Image (spheres, grey):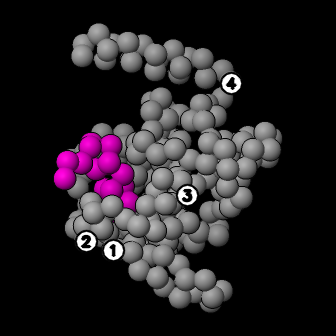
Amino acid sequence: MLISHEREKLLQTVVYFAQNTKFCGKVKLFKLLYFLDFEHFKVTGRSVTGLKYSAWKMGPVPTKLFDEIESPEPDFAEALEITEIPTYRGNPMLSFTPIHPFSNEFFTKRELKLLDKLATEYKNTKAEDMIEATHLENLPWDKVFNQQASPQAEIPYEYALQVNEKDEMLKIVRERKEMIEAIG
């Protein structure tokens, strides 16, 4: 099975967070991925994983990954074991256990620094304590879910940018695309 570079980065990112944080269930993982992608976009104009996020009630959700966790693709199943752990609330938490160690070969130095920063910052944090951080006023999830009243809608990456940053970043992204098209 041929795996794309972007797909390999997603799998390795999940492995990294599973190895380097505690309580890394589905909700915490989704929050970490969201922070990673939107923070990276804010600086570079592109996400790390290529995931698209929707504004669900409990926060941003990478819907494609949400669906895949229910029925993992073979490469996902070869990289991570998913188990249910009982919780005091009665709903089991899905836990991700890496089958193979993390490989940094697919990442830039900036991406690795951001992975490490997020894993360190949220190492001992439980998912419910991270929910508020994704729901802050005027951040991307809030703009879609509350301000636009569009539950389930996709959260545009551009919402990570401040108004004055948006035009400049979009110009840079366009220039990069034109340069790639000219080369390729």
Q: Which mark is residue 31?
A: 3
Q: Which mark is residue 163?
A: 4
| Residue at image coords 52%, 44% | 52
Q: Which residue is under mark 2?
A: 99
Q: Which residue is under mark 1?
A: 81
Q: Position of residue 21 (x, y in %)?
A: 43, 68
Amino acid marked by disc 4: Val
Instruction: Name the dominant secondary structure of the magenta segment.
Output: helix
99 left or right of 114 in image: left
How far is the residue under mark 3 from the one under mark 4?
Answer: 24 Å
Residues at marks 2 and 1 touching, judged by CB atoms closer than 8 Å: yes
Is residue 137 something one can see in this rendering?
no
Question: Which corner quadrant holds the C terminus?
Answer: top left
Q: Residues within 10 Å of mark 4 (few under 14, many from 20)?
A: few
Q: Residues within 10 Å of mark 3 (few under 14, many from 20)?
A: many
Of callouts 2 and 1, which one flags the residue occurring earlier in the amino acid sequence?
1
Q: Relative to the observer, which residue lies in front, 49 or 136?
A: 49
